[in-house]
Amino acid sequence: MKLYKLTTLVVGGLIIVMGAKAQCLTPITHFHANNSPYMPYNDNFISGFMQSASQQTADNGFLQMPFVGDPLLVYVGEKDSTQFTAYASGYIFEERAPQNYQLRYTRYDITANIAAMPAYCVQRYAYPDTTAEKGFLVDIDNAMTGAANEDMDIVFIDKRTIRAYKRSTLNSSNAPALYYVAHFSHPFNKWNVRREVVRTENGQREQRCKAAFVFDLKPGEELTVQSAVSAVSTDGAYAAIGKPLAKRHFSDQRKAQPQLSTNGQPLTAQRQTQASRTTKCPTTTATSRPAQSNSSMTAASTLPVRYIEISTRDAQMQAAFAAALSQLMHNANCRKAANATELLNAIAPLYNCDATKTDDNAVLTDSLLRQYAQSLFTGQSGNLSDTQAAWFVFNAMGLVPHNDNGQDGYKLVRPLFNVVTLHLPRGRRLILHTKNNNRQNLYIAQAKLMHQPLKNNQYLTHTQLLKGGVLEIKMARQAN
């Protein structure tokens, strides 16, 4: 009989007890900055549980998280090199016995019971009685030391079983090869995979690979997930959960690097095509049926919420903005939008400045924005109407619908974000760049579109928006 020596690891204020040769399960409350040698923590939020093959690989595994609604398969502030997951939730621990965790995700109102066995993990999730989608998310590229993996993928074996791997293309001990298998108690009827390459603020290119699964659960039904991670092979992970080996499985060899000729070009056109596939970005895949192989996956059209791009280091504000947009996407006109202009036009009828009476009160507007952001981020926004969500989106961007002497357009107000990019028709963009933007400087001192002052430094017409360009806004402590 094998004996497993128990060790204790403290992560972000959470105590984890693990077997030295058992599966390693780590609650993640950190966010990672590439240009910092430290790993900052925020114990108010949890991004899920990272599962790895052993304590030696605990900082680089497969992050797992349940969700309700639309999954946010991104990190907050990609361009700021901030690796704080947008799907993070507040949490309350009800029990933390050795290798057993019971907690409630306050953002989603999900009760979780997670147990780490010597060879595998069992996760049980009780979802709220809601008409919103109920799902399970796997973040493959997430790692406590940053996204160092460059070779990652996921395959769906059937509607109940998935497998994935992550490994570096370099022989690095910081990114060991890991293989993951999960089996669900219920079949998933929708799935979404996000693969892309991003360039962070410091110029570094990083791979992203995340997947979300949606289940048709009846009220009171629990989702059970059996998962295992092996540092040896996919077959080893299958054996750990007691499932028969699949007919098709990953090669356990690292992907071969393209062979180059003396002039640095690929030797064959076929290899050149393969190389271009490995750097293709970004790709989002969504369908109602599981694919049999990666080659059958097709890229879906860009989601409307991506027509508005924001840049911030504030994880709460980023996630709240995405949550507000996701709420508005239930509107049929919003779902039909093909660019930022159409999306704003669809949201504008929902905007009602009389509902808040704050358009001319910068202090009250800022306070209400942060109140809504907290409510949206923690998932306690059940009473937030579409009108309030529309108000939050427009004011957070710094553009509110306005009619100036019969001419439709937008009035500029103090935005939450320093940079907002609107993707317009015919490949055009409008970039709103705000300077001196903080909670003391609540008033607009100057606004120029392509170096030309706007009317009263406040009014942007619909025609001006459609032309695109750079809108520079300078903030001040006092109104002009």
Image: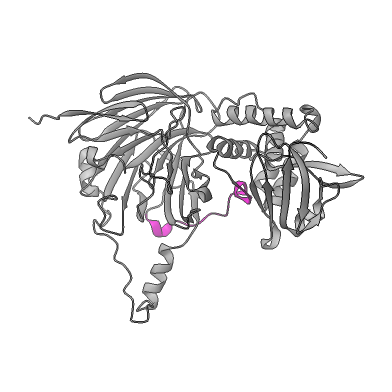
Q: Position of residue 304 (x, y in %)?
A: 62, 48
| Vertical placement of residue 445 versus 299, above or below | above
Extreme residue toward the right, this view: 405
Out of 328 and 380, give the one closest to the viewer: 380
Residue visible at 65% across and 27% down?
A: 384
Decide whether residue 303 is among the magenta residues: yes
Side of 265 where 359 appears, left or right: right
Total tally of numbered discs in the picture: 0
Q: With respect to residue 266, does 278 lie above or below?
A: above
- Does the magenta-highlighted stretch encompass residue 40? no
Q: For residue 385, say whether it is visible.
A: no
Q: Is residue 267 visible?
A: yes
Judge from the rendering whether residue 377 lies leftward or rightward of residue 292; answer left or right.
Answer: right
Q: Quadrant of the N terminus?
A: top left
Q: Position of residue 58 (x, y in %)?
A: 28, 39
Question: Within the image, what quadrant is residue 211 found in?
Answer: top left
The C terminus lies in which quarter of the figure?
Answer: top right
* Image x and y of residue 451, in percent: 77, 58
Please state the extent of the stretch shown in magenta in the rendering: 293-310
Colour option used:
one colour
Q: Residue furthest top?
A: 94
Q: Residue at x 34, y 26 (%)?
A: 14
x and y percent of residue 354 in the render? Answer: 81, 29
**Residue sitting at x 38%, y 74%:** 270
Which residue ends up furthest to the bottom in the rendered image? 262
Q: Is residue 88 left or right of residue 406?
A: left
Q: Nearer the viewer, residue 19 or 159?
A: 19
Q: Residue furthest front?
A: 477
